[in-house]
Image: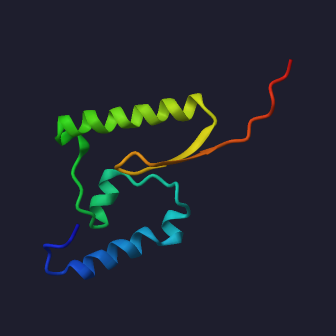
Amino acid sequence: MFGKNRNALVKARSVVAKLTDYSGNKGHDRHIDFDECKSIGLNVCPLESDQELQDLALTVHHCYMHLLMNTAAFKIIENQVGAAFVKNAQLPPPTR
């Protein structure tokens, strides 16, 4: 992210310090919006600036949301070659 910047190490350490500051973040699941990402020094651009990328990202997002809402899965980790780890909730047996 900062590889071409002459102060890459300093910038990276600053970003890491801000993202790992418990008093500001309090938890792993806290949303960090675009403006905050920019303000802490992350090199980001809006997803809307690239329509094709936005369509692809939203397609993946919607697939995962559909899966998570309609199955017992609650955590999915998948790599670029299709190997996946899926954690499922223990569901009670169906009642009659």
| Observer-nearest of 35 and 8 | 8
Residue at the image point whose x is 53% and y is 70% from the top: 23
Q: Quadrant of residue 68?
A: top right
Q: Position of residue 92 (x, y in %)?
A: 80, 34
Image: 45 above or below 68: below
Quadrant where the N terminus is found in the figure = bottom left
Residue 40 as seen in the image, left or right of residue 66? left
Residue at the image point whose x is 73% and y is 41% from the top: 90
**Total label count?**
0
Residue 64 as seen in the image, left or right of residue 43? right
| Observer-nearest of 31 and 56 | 56
Residue at the image point whose x is 19% and y is 35% from the top: 52
Q: Position of residue 6 (x, y in %)?
A: 13, 80
| Observer-nearest of 47 and 71 | 71
Q: Position of residue 49 (x, y in %)?
A: 17, 41
Residue at the image point whose x is 21% and y is 71% from the top: 2
Quadrant where the C terminus is found in the figure = top right
State how the image is colored. Answer: rainbow
Image: 10 above or below 85: below
Q: Position of residue 89 (x, y in %)?
A: 68, 42
Residue 51 as seen in the image, left or right of residue 23? left
Residue 40 as seen in the image, left or right of residue 87? left
| Observer-nearest of 90 and 24 | 90
Name of the residue lying farthest toward the right: 96
